[in-house]
Image (tube, coloured by chain):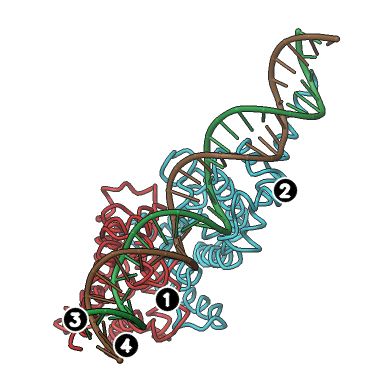
Chain colours: A cyan, B red, C brown, D green
Amino acid sequence: MGSAERKEREKHETREMILAAAKKLFLNEGFEHVTMRRIATEIEYSPAAVYLYFKDKDAIYCALQEQGFKELYRCQSVLTAIKRPDEKLRACGRIYLDFAMENQELYDLMFIMRAPLMAFESPEDWNLGRDTYEVLQNIINECIEQGYLKAPNAQIACFSLWALLHGVVSIFIRDRAPMIAKEHRAQVINGILDFTMTEFLDK
Amino acid sequence: MGSAERKEREKHETREMILAAAKKLFLNEGFEHVTMRRIATEIEYSPAAVYLYFKDKDAIYCALQEQGFKELYRCQSVLTAIKRPDEKLRACGRIYLDFAMENQELYDLMFIMRAPLMAFESPEDWNLGRDTYEVLQNIINECIEQGYLKAPNAQIACFSLWALLHGVVSIFIRDRAPMIAKEHRAQVINGILDFTMTEFLDK
DNA sequence: AAATTTACTAAACTGTGTTCAGTAAATAAT
DNA sequence: ATTATTTACTGAACACAGTTTAGTAAATTT
């Protein structure tokens, strides 16, 4: 009877194996190579076996999306060490941009792809996304309270800043900026961060 | 021998029919319902016939993308009537946001979808996109010259503003903003435009 | 030792994009 | 006017997706 928990552990391990295989295909070989069959052969199972662990392909996407949000949240944790709200805001932007550009496929999955409908379906599943957003929201609030930023509406200011950050990286990730050579991207991103911060922050 | 030009005209008309059918499916029934077979049945041809007019599905996407850019450029043409650069900049943002939210599927095709690789492949095909971008670029330049905006780098300022606009609409279009109720979207967009303009523009 | 549950697979179904061999009509050549 | 050729198309297939179903062999429980 004690084998029940071992069973559960094994089940969990296989699940993780599938997720790892899917993530590997995603990151190393790009989005279009993630097929249920490829995932299955990667872990040396039959395609049908994957469906014993995930309802469908979308469920795998959602699980990876969740991992992505956890990772982004982890990246944001260093912000607590920064005291001045304006520095904190800049660092927050920096972290977001770096995360996106260093994990482009993952970012795409989290914020651009149509597939994982986690976003609107069940609000409780969005909690992880909400957490990462609240980090920015709180910093903006601090900035306003301490006079680093005067905005009539904190919500609007927050959303604007997020939109700017998301806009920059999603334009690059989906290759919509042919006017900017690939080797200048990092430079442009730095310039945008500088420009935005000096433009947004007063005092 | 005079029938040659009639032939060419007929060929062109069929091409347009295919494009119209594809666009209709796109706009009325959403992205996922655009299949080569659906397009074919829509114009009462066999699926194979479509391939006599377009190399592949991607070629259809590219043609629609082109239409989209032409339409956006047309929308921007009213800007010439506005004299003050700051008003012009705000109107430019307004036009972009409205175009995106009123033609979401088309905007998606133009700026978000992976499929049409027009972007990087052949630079001369990007000309239409470049034209619409230059409209913004020129306004920004005017703003800087006439002291409405002080930015160390016009290119950076321009890209930042575009990124902000694109960020806002792409977050909505791809349903990544569950924190903002659908009925508040228009309001939020107005708020962002206001906030951004007062924040960016001096004097 | 028998019954049942578990973890899996082989093979198929549906629906994609796409190609290819063929055909019937329109056109051109003789 | 008759033949040859080009044009505009179609039917059927191919390869490859996601997914389902029926079955099986091993592990577990009784």
- Chain under disc 3: B
Tell me the quarter of the image containing the C terminus of chain A: bottom left
Whether tag 4 and tag 3 are in contact, CB under 8 A, the answer is no
Tell me the quarter of the image containing the N terminus of chain A: top right
- The amino acid type, in three-letter code, at marker 3 is Arg
Quarter of image, res A163: bottom left
- What residue is shown at x 28% (from left), y 66% (from top)? B18
Residue A110 appears left or right of B194: right
- What residue is shown at x 49% (from left), y 72% (from top)? A172
- The amino acid type, in three-letter code, at marker 1 is Met
Q: CA distance from mark 1 to mark 2?
A: 36 Å
Dot 4 and dot 1 within a common chain: yes
Q: CA distance from mark 1 to mark 3?
A: 31 Å
Q: Position of residue A118 (x, y in %)?
A: 47, 45
Whether tag 4 and tag 2 are in contact, CB under 8 A, the answer is no
- The amino acid type, in three-letter code, at marker 2 is Ile
Front disc: 1 or 3: 3
- The amino acid type, in three-letter code, at marker 4 is Asn
- What residue is shown at x 19% (from left), y 84% (from top)? B3
Whether tag 4 and tag 1 are in contact, CB under 8 A, the answer is no
Residue B196 appears left or right of A108: left
Is label 4 in a helix, a strand or a loop?
Answer: helix
Is label 2 in a helix, a strand or a loop?
Answer: loop
For label 4, the residue is B141
For label 2, the residue is A43
Front-most of residues C28 and D8? C28
For label 1, the residue is B118
Q: Position of residue B134 (x, y in %)?
A: 32, 84
- Chain under disc 2: A
- What residue is shown at x 26% (from left), y 48% (from top)? B183
For label 3, the residue is B6
Residue B14 appears left or right of B169: left
